[in-house]
Image (cartoon, coloured by chain):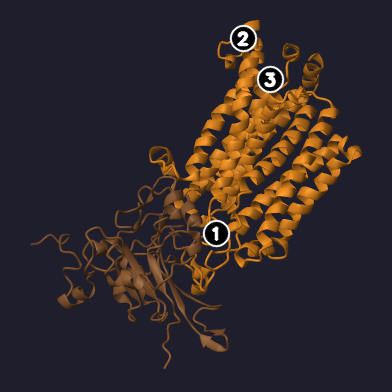
Chain colours: A brown, B orange
Amino acid sequence: MPDPKKVSPVDALPAASRAYGEIGRHSGKPHWGMVVDQERCIGCWSCAVVCKSENNVPLGGWWNRILTDGDALDEPRDERGQLQMAWLPLACQHCENAPCVKVCPVAATYHRDDGVVMMDNDRCIGCRYCMIACPYGVRTFNWGTPERPTPHETGMVAARPLGTVEKCTLCVHRIAEGQVPSCVWSCPAQARIFGDLNDPDSRVARLARDGRVLLEEAGTKPSVIYLSPRRKHEL
Amino acid sequence: MSAGTLGIAASRSTGRWGLALWTAVLLVMMAAGLAAFAYQFANGLIVTGLRNTMMWGQYILFFMFFVGLSAGGLIVASAGRLFGVTAFKPITRLAVVEATVAVMLAGIFIIPDLGRPERVLNILLHPNLTSPMVWDITIVIAYTVLSMSYVWLYTRADLARRGSWLALGTGVSARELARDERLKSILAWIALPAAILLHSITAWIFGLQISRTFWYSAIMAPLFIASALVSGLSLVILLALTLRRLRRIDFEDRLVAYLGALLGVFVVVEAFFVGSEFLTAAYPGVPDDTGPITRLVVGPYAPLFWTEAIVGLVVPFVILAVSRTRRRPELVALAAGLAIAGIFVHRLNLLLNGLSFVPIPLPPGVAIGASQADAARSFATYHWYVPTIVEWLVVLGVLAFGALLFTLAVLVLPLREHLVEEHADI
């Protein structure tokens, strides 16, 4: 009988499903990044929910949220007499100049060689300085014993202990299998594009040239790039 | 000297009962604090009023408050020596003991703030040198050692005269006393910059964070120093008057007026820095920068801010600026009490206003990090922080420990400056 641990969940997928999630071309030394197309985003929160189940995120914590660009959740706002509506999907921006990495007193949050900002939950002392330093508010702390809607854990990642900080890992466990993060894979509007920003010809790198980053003035150099929600063509 | 001994003898029987009661109360508070901490350790920080939307609270507030009390006490003590202000001599030992106890409490207050207090040694095992928190813990440890040596150096000759083992076998020969004076001067040269550094680094924990517009300012370190001087000197004045009443130290009312005048100057400097910060943030009219100022001046935190400004700055300044009121020790004590409360509220405002509003305030906001019966409360853009009873018990327990430590120091250490030494100095 084969060792169940050696059969990865991706191996178990049907071929068509596996092909849909494949990262595709990348340079030998990738810097993983994501483009989020705000024009395509329909604010359905699928990616946020899939993220929670994939990463075993406890109740009350979200690694990925869909903010409404306006005054109230899912409500349009008045822009020069026109009703406008747009969403801002927000998770860790995997900054190159990451304030959280700088301030962590024990280097429990750090950069991987591929640009992913990671957490070591066995080292984290729970001081929450990284949450103070993050200008995007994407980190969440395990205030109490992690609670889940069912008695069971979900997804493909081990739970993080009480009293430590957690956040989006860009699904490094999926990247290791050549698959895009679960938010990218699950987006029904295909508003998320994942790939290697080091490869100038990759789709993500080409799209990123027309995008903007959040809070550019903070100088954090995020690896997540947003495409503007106002790109309608004139007839 | 003999008058002081007589005074203690006269009040010995009532004093002994008072001391026993005081110690008992402190021990009960410490036990309650320890129990609350054990409860928090078992259940996690969910038992506090903190969440993802307001991640630091009561413990960090008391941490920075006590760093300030400590730095202020030692700056007063060592500046007195460095600039040859002999008037401070009767209270120098007291100020140094106060600084030592305060910095120890500051260090202790970090522990309950951690989600995993049992991993605290990771800071020493895997330090990340770009973290202001690592700088701060380094200076807190160094400063604790420094201020303890300072206390010992100032009291060791008298301890040796009493034959106490705390003198560590040192004697009182003329040569040893001369060496004491040399060492005191050297230590003052180290202690003054260390005290300023201690409080600057604590300021940089907050002031270097671009994510928090209200904190991200070059005035943060100078402002923290000013706050330290106001609160530290105020506490020294209050403790000095208390200990004089208990006949542990002697000084004349003139010294109180002198310290009061100094405190008045510090209060003005504090007010000047706060005003300068507010004007710089508000003038360009950028919403990210004016928002925090509006909240403080007319917004939800206005009652706290105006308490800080009027009770903590204006009233003490008036009392201390008028020479007739400044010459009355009880009024100087009142001014010091108000100023210390004002600095506490100032730090509360700094923490609340810096943190409780999320940086990207689009709806629905930040996930608060704990499961909610009402799903609408799972996200928030704003957090009205109220410390829980657990946080209060832990804080009161640590404060009781500090009070006990200080009481012990007062009982064991000779805080009265020895007359012989004063002559040796001239």
Q: Is residue B386 visible to us here?
A: no
Quarter location, residue A1: bottom left
Give how far apart the Cα atoms at labels 1 and 2 are: 54 Å
Disc 2, SS: helix
Q: Residue at horizontal 79%, vertical 19%?
A: B4
Asked if badges 3 and 2 are on one and the same chain, I answer yes
Q: Residue furthest bottom?
A: A235
Q: Amino acid at mark 3?
A: Pro
Q: Which residue is mark 1?
A: B54
The mark closer to the camera, 3 or 1, is 1
The kind of residue tagged 2 is Glu
What quarter of the picture does the C terminus of chain B occupy?
top right
Q: Is residue B393 left or right of residue B418?
A: left
Location of mark 2 (residue): B176
* Distance of label 3 from label 2 (alpha carbons): 18 Å
Name the residue rendered at 54%, 69% in the picture. Answer: B361
